Image (cartoon, rainbow, N blue to C red):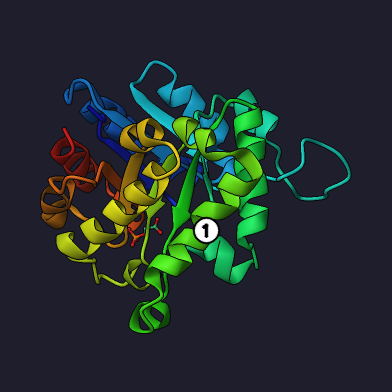
Amino acid sequence: MRRKFVAGNWKMHGSLAENQVLLDALNRGIANLGQIDCAVCVPYPYLFQAQNILHDSSLSWGAQNLSQHAKGAFTGEISATMLKDFGCHYVLVGHSERRSLYGEDSVLVAQKFKAAQASNLIPILCVGETLAQREQGVTEAVVSEQLDAVVLLCGVEAYSRAVVAYEPVWAIGTGKTASPQQAQEVHQFIRRKLAARAATVAEQLRILYGGSVKAANSNELFTMPDIDGGLIGGASLDAEEFLKICSSAH
Ligand code: PGA
């Protein structure tokens, strides 16, 4: 049985004062939800704050990106061991905004995935197609290429220590959620594809859906057989909304 997992992606939002309010509210709310896996992926400067506020909480925290390198002359970059220093459990890799705005291709994303695992972080690998790609009917080919890059570099077994997030680019921040059926189709494709190489790994892999998830649609999405939770952007900045989404995964 896969345990549901909900992760928030704050993106470039927050301030010390705002985060204090949000994290305090999440901390209190999560305590009432019982056994559930939830996390927030916060901007780097706030990892220390997240660690301070959440150290006793069942809410985990993580980052939104990392360097593929372990250390060295890489001005402005952040390594996996630095994230571990601040108690991170998770790190997003290959978010579509990183791919499209910062030119991260699947090879680089796989290197980041590998660097995360080398420091015992759980990478949350984001995959998904653009609207144009969906309309061209190449969704499966696009997602395959994104998944295969990791298999090539790290081996399929690496997925046993990772989470995958399917996020159709056209659904991110647009208010246009994929229907539960549309999402389920791709989730099932991802699981079957990996199952062809490693059945147990695929069966145990948590595949999250992301893209305009909110409390009003999370229940429906999370009841689909291959949807194991969500990666939540905008709605994760609102404590009440995020907690409702977490409880619908419960
Ligand atoms: P959204 O973002 O929930 O605001 O659509 C999801 C994401 O980018 O991870």
Q: Residue at x 66, y 34 (%)?
A: 80
Give x and y (percent) for residue 205. 36, 36
The amino acid type of the residue labelled 1 equals Gln
Please give the name of the residue rendered at 71% of the width and 45% of the height, measured from the top-left corner: 68
Q: Residue at x 86, y 39 (%)?
A: 72
* Residue 143 location (% of width, % of height): 44, 62
Rendered-image quadrant of the N terminus? top left
- Report whether 210 appears left or right of 30: right
- For ligand 1, give the image quadrant: bottom left
Badge 1 density bin: few <14, some 14–19, many ≥20, Cα 10 Å: many
Q: Residue sitting at 77 percent across and 35 percent down?
A: 70
User: Quarter of the image containing the C terminus?
Assistant: top left
Q: Nearer the viewer, residue 5 or 14?
A: 5
Residue placed furthest toward the right = 73
Please state the total of marks drawn on the protein image: 1
Q: Which residue is mark 1?
A: 146
Relative image position of residue 10 (x, y in whole percent): 43, 50
- Could you say which quadrant of the image residue 247 lies in? top left
Can residue 67 be seen here? yes
210 relative position to 11: left or right: left
Instruction: Report whether residue 65 is seen.
Output: no
Whether 176 is drawn above or below 45: the answer is below
Q: Quadrant of residue 172?
A: bottom left
Q: Where, by quadrant of the figure, is residue 35 drawn?
A: top left
Q: Secondary structure at mark 1?
A: helix
Left or right: where 193 falls relative to 64: left
